[in-house]
Image (cartoon, rainbow, N blue to C red):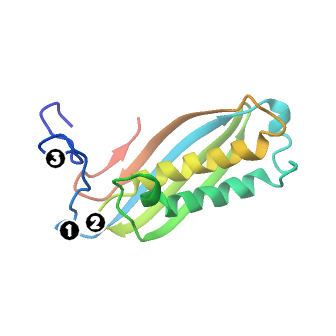
Amino acid sequence: MSPQTPFSHLDAQGGAHMVDVSDKPVTRRVAEASCRVLLAPETIGRLTQLPKGDAFAVARLAGIQGAKRTSELIPLAHPLPLDQVEVELHPLPEGVEIRSRIVVTARTGAEMEALTACSTAALALYDMVKAVEKGVVITDLRLETKSGGRSGEYQRT
């Protein structure tokens, strides 16, 4: 977006508003996002045996639920009929990588749903491990790819 292009969610007076997408075509859209949760090595080894249960299972379900509730959390996001939500957690030497993939057939994209899925999964993981580690860091939340819609393809380089 160039400096001269107005933000789509701001009106002429600078007030926030929900964008009218009624004239946009319904297309298949896919968005993928990721983030990392930094943990101590001893915590990583205990992720499936924590006092609250299996952290991966809980975080995965929280991410799916977060994607489904995005329009309730992000004020200007449109409610979307999600076709698929995938949330994967991968152990890393320094913690856990969380990746989400959202598929929707709609008039607007699913980037916010993908980002919300990752962030909600990360927060649930934090909640699961806080009893054994207080210094958890959630970092690097970002959109990885998107396809479909008027703005076309995006791939993080």
- Alpha carbon distance from label 3 to label 1: 17 Å
* Dot 3 or dot 1, earlier in sequence: 3
For numbered disc 3, what is the local secondary structure?
loop
Residue 156, relative to residue 65: is it above or below? Answer: above
Classed neighbour count for the residue bearing mark 3: other residues with Cα under 10 Å, few (<14), some (14–19), many (≥20): few
Q: CA distance from mark 3 to mark 2?
A: 20 Å
94 or 19, which is in the foreground?
19
The three-letter code of the residue at mark 3 reads Asp
Mark 2: amino acid: Arg
What is the CA distance from the residue labelled 2 to the residue labelled 1? Answer: 7 Å
Q: Is residue 4 above or below residue 100?
A: above
| Residue 15 pos. (x, y %) | 21, 44
Residue 11 spot, x, y in % from top left = 16, 46
**Which of the two discs, 3 and 2, labels the residue nearer the N terminus?**
3
User: Which residue corresponds to mark 1?
Assistant: 22
Q: Quadrant of the N terminus?
A: top left
User: Within 10 Å of the Cα at label 2, are there few (<14), some (14-19), or many (20+) other Cα atoms?
Assistant: many
Say whether marks 3 and 2 touch (CB < 8 Å). no
Q: Is residue 139 left or right of residue 111?
A: right
Q: Which residue is mark 3?
A: 11
Categorize mark 1 by other alpha carbons within 10 Å: few (<14), some (14-19), many (20+): few
Q: Quadrant of the C terminus?
A: top left
Which residue is denoted by mark 2 in the rendering? 107
